[in-house]
Amino acid sequence: MKTRTNWLLILLISGFIISGCSPRAKYERRLKHELASGVRYDSLFLGLYFGMPEKDFYVHCWNLNHKGLLKQGESNTTAEYQLKDELKHPAVMDFYPKFNQGKISEMPVSFKYKGWAPWNKALSSDNLQIEVQKWYEKVYGGGFIKVKHPLHGIAYVKIDGNRRISIFKENDLRVWAVFTDMSVKKGWNDSVSKPENITSDTTSSLKK
């Protein structure tokens, strides 16, 4: 009986250790630590930033359009930026922010390779996701946590202060990177969102 009890204790302790080392536990510790630090990382890309007023966003994009850097994206609902040398192959980046009280609080960004075809494995979303992550590590630094999403497979999440970056695949063509201001999201449902709610929560659905 004593031996059986000892084995149960060992199993319980092992379970706690494994749970504490899970991707979700690691993510939650990182999120708590970064938010508690009080450090802000508001920079996004192309001069855009968290807290940018909606009017300033439109004016800034209009100026980038007149410089030939941006154009209207898919269905005229996003801004499109051409990626030439950032990845292994030419790609298209589309984005449009979400606003909270008239200021940017989240920025969903989609990527797809130019010339994509189902039979061209070099231009698959599997390779694109890896390339986006490598590029973002150069721009925003390392520290991405590899997690498992039940619907979209492997995802990568990085948290610096208030800024969370989540990279995941939608399908064979498209990869998403979502920038979220967690100081604004605090107290909300902690989810990774994007237009038309194509995906469900990335972080709360992590497999332990």
Image (tube, grey):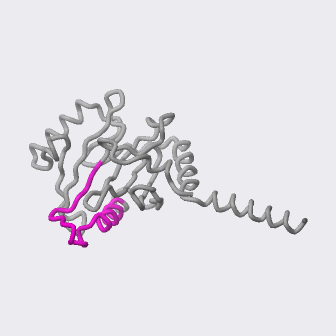
> Where 148 falls versus 190 (above or below)?
below
Question: Within the image, what quadrant is residue 18 found in?
Answer: bottom right
Name the residue rendered at 41%, 41% in the picture: 181
Q: Which residue lies furthest to the front in this view?
A: 1
Tell whether 79 sits left or right of 195.
left
Examine the structure image and report whether residue 47 is included in the region drawn in magenta. Answer: no
Q: What stretch is highlighted in magenta?
A: 109-136
Query: What quarter of the picture does the C terminus occupy?
Result: bottom right
> Where 120 falls versus 43 (above or below)?
below
> Where 17 falls versus 81 (above or below)?
below
Name the residue rendered at 15%, 47% in the picture: 70
Name the residue rendered at 25%, 65% in the picture: 87
Q: Which of 94 and 119 is in front in this view?
A: 119
- Residue 48 image offset from top left, x and y in percent: 28, 43
Question: Within the image, what quadrant is residue 84 found in?
Answer: bottom left
Tell whether 90 sits left or right of 177.
left
- Residue 106 image offset from top left, x and y in percent: 35, 41
How many dots with numbers?
Answer: 0
- Residue 9 image offset from top left, x and y in percent: 80, 61
